[in-house]
Image (spheres, rainbow, N blue to C red):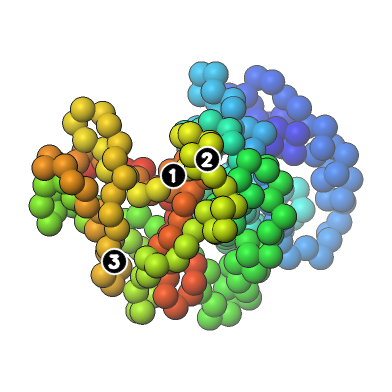
Amino acid sequence: MESWATPETLQACNVSTVDSTLYNAMIYPYVIGPMALTGFTWYQGEANVDERRGDEGAIRYSCTFPGMIRQWREAFQAPDAFFGFVQLSTWCGDPELIAEMRTIGQMAALALPKVGYSTNADHGAGCNIHPPPKQFCATRLANSALAIQYNKPVAWKSPSFASQKCGYPGPGAATIKLSDVSSKGLRDDVVPFNYLNGAFDCTKNAGKCAWAELKFGDGSWVNATVAVSGDTVTFTSDRLQFPVASRYGWGAVPMMNLYDKQTELPVLPWAENCTSV
């Protein structure tokens, strides 16, 4: 990402290594205007995932990415320009770092106005960092632009984690409430695209697949059974203990089977500690 940002943007995030090569070659020459510009689309982030030295990686991206968006809008004299990004797809890198980039790094941009997103985490190609199926995230991103920039009544936000109650309806369970769920509620019977027809063999790629899981006091994560009702999801396990955290699709290759019945948008991955029992 640093190649697309200005030195000032990077320095504001305490980035000492400045590389603005692509900004100088592919952005700056076109800011001479005024120029008719409605918005930007952005599909990047993999190259920043493995930067985990000090405060780099997803944490650093959560500063530099919004900073770059603000700077581009200022440079093009287009403060109301739409900016849409694609949440990262799948590949066989570090599962925790990839999941952090999707949620902590990229989604930080939503704090800015007129920013939309779409996810491609449910339509990856296993270890292929450049998945061929891009029509799904393209349609979702187009819908976000229609809603945000053109005020069309189009649903574009995926359901996402809102809150959870651990130890409910009993030990070994957690009930999670989601936001941005349509009136028709959720479905949990979708066969994950990443798993469909043997597209990705989880047994041969240990630790890469990410399902619905609960964490317990001994530090272990166990696969959970999932049930949906309206805008809530219940994870249950065979443990007679209270969980300390839940997560869903939190990894390199998310096995996402939860979708909104009406919008057909997938529930976004999450990893959240339990705050109360």
* Image position of 85 with respect to 266: above or below: above
Percent x, y of residue 245 = 26, 40
* Image position of 143 with respect to 58: above or below: below
Earlier sequence position, callout 2 versus callout 1? 1
> Could you say whether the residue bearing mark 2 is in a helix, strand or loop?
loop
Percent x, y of residue 47 = 67, 34
> Could you say whether the residue bearing mark 3 is in a helix, strand or loop?
strand
Earlier sequence position, callout 3 versus callout 2? 3
State left or right for residue 132 relative to residue 143.
right
* Residue type for callout 2: Ala
Instruction: Name which residue lies at 51% across and 18% down.
Output: 54
Q: CA distance from mark 2 to mark 1?
A: 7 Å
Classify 10 Å Cα crowding around label 3: few (below 14), some (14-19), many (20 and above): some
Percent x, y of residue 98 = 53, 37
Q: Quadrant of residue 160?
A: bottom left
Percent x, y of residue 203 = 48, 39
Earlier sequence position, callout 3 versus callout 1? 1
* Residue type for callout 1: Ala
Q: Disc number at residue 5?
A: none
Residue marked by disc 2: 252
Contact, mark 3 vs mark 1 (Cβ under 8 Å): no
Residue 112 visible in the shown view: no
Residue marked by disc 3: 228
Instruction: Name which residue lies at 44% across and 78% down.
Output: 262
Residue marked by disc 1: 210
Quarter containing the N terminus: top right
Q: CA distance from mark 3 to mark 2?
A: 24 Å
* Residue type for callout 3: Val
